[in-house]
Every structure is written in C-alpha cells, then in structure tokens.
Amino acid sequence: MSEETHPGGLDGVIAAANQAPGRGLPPVHLWKPAHCGEIDIVIKKNGLWFHEGTPIGREALVRLFSTVLRKDPEGFVLVTPVEKLAISVEDAPFVAVRVDRRVDVEGRAVLRFITNVGDEVDAGPDHPIRVDMDAETGEPRPYVHVRAGLEALINRPVFYEVAEFAVSRATPDGPRMSVESNGAWFPVGPLEGPGAL
C-alpha cells in the first residue's frame, strides 16, 4: 500500500495490520514513520483494550491492533508505514492466559505460553520469564517476553501452573524456586517468606 493511498488514524492502523498474511506479523520493525500524535487507546492491566473509554469488544480487532503494536524508547505505539500513534499501556500489553508443558526431543522441558491476543511463545533464552514483586501487595508479578520488547503478564491461574513445575535451585541471589524451559532456568519466587511459592 503506497503512502498516497494509505489512510490515516485508526483506519490506517487497521489497513496496515491487514497487510499481514494469515497470522503473520507485519514488519513493524522496518517501518520508520514520523510520530503523528496519540490515539485514545488504553490497554488495561487485565489485558482489555479500550478506545475512547469504551472496551473494544471485537476480539479480532484487538488481535489485529496487537500485530502493529511496537515498543519504542518513548513508549508504546501503533505503527503503520506512514504514521505512528502513541497509546497508553497500564502494565504489559499482553496477558498470558494459558501454559502448556512438553518435553522436546532432547529431553528438555518447554513451557509454551498463549496470550490473550493469540500469540504463542516458548519460554527460553530468547523469551525469558521474569518475576517482579508488587511494591504495594508483595505479590509476584510474572511476565514472559513475547516479541521485540513486548511482554505478557502471566495471569494468576497460569502462574500457579508454572509454580507447580518449580524446583529449588541455586542462583546468584541464593536459593530460589525456579522453572526450566528450553534449557534456560528462570527464578520465579523465594523459598520462603513473602512471595514464596
């Protein structure tokens, strides 16, 4: 789609996202448009997308928007070949809503996460799991890297499943409960005290 025929604003975002064949992702990392302002889209902590204060109820539209989401140094943007529009993200842009564990041909455990927008990612060296502790509640806030700096918050039921696979393992911070995926180990909680698994 040429710049001359590319629509702007929300219509442009939809048109750019529709360029991705099948479930493939558009090449947003190659697009270098000028910053064109903001669009009133907010991704809430629970993964729900809002436009102008109203939830975006069409799952297919949210998935479409997620394919043109990018994290730039100045924040999260929806990007097309000719413009980029800043949006607000309260926590992580995605939520991991499912995890499946399998053993690969080399006998290693692999944790595959599925997000609320349909991404599937195998945790490992390129897709690490990290756990922050919520300063207010002391509860763990677990994340998995999805793509290009975009993470998914691992929702509580899924994190409980992940915790079932955790074993005590030595780390630079002392013994921690950790999980393995694709040959990498990720600390997910202390052995005891606040946040213990």
Image (cartoon, rainbow, N blue to C red):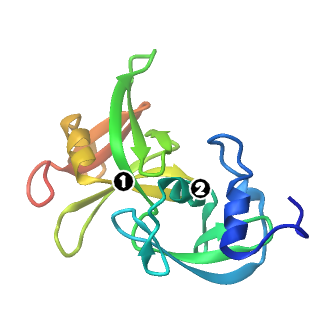
Quarter in which the N terminus is drawn: bottom right
> Percent from the top left, x then y, of residue 53?
43, 80
Residue nearest the observer in this picture, 130 or 64: 64
Label 2 CA crowd tier, 10 Å (few <14, some 14–19, many 20+): many
**Residue reaching furthest left?**
193
> Percent from the top left, x then y, of residue 21?
71, 42
User: Is 157 located above or below residue 68 in the figure?
Assistant: above
- Give the residue displayed 50% in from the left and 45% down from the top: 119
Query: Where does label 1 land, which residue?
Result: 130
Residue nearest the observer in this picture, 27 or 10: 10
Residue nearest the observer in this picture, 83 or 5: 5
**Residue reaching furthest bottom?**
37
Residue nearest the observer in this picture, 162 or 55: 55
- Give the residue displayed 70% in from the left and 53% down from the top: 18
Q: Secondary structure at mark 1?
A: strand
Label 1 CA crowd tier, 10 Å (few <14, some 14–19, many 20+): some
- Give the residue displayed 55% in from the left and 58% down from the top: 61
User: In the image, 106: left or right of 187?
Assistant: right
**Mark 1 against mark 2, which lies toward the viewer?**
2
Whichever of callouts 1 and 2 sits on the residue coming sooner in the sequence is 2
Amino acid of disc 2: Leu
Query: Where does label 2 land, which residue?
Result: 64
- Cα distance in 3D space between marks 1 and 2: 27 Å
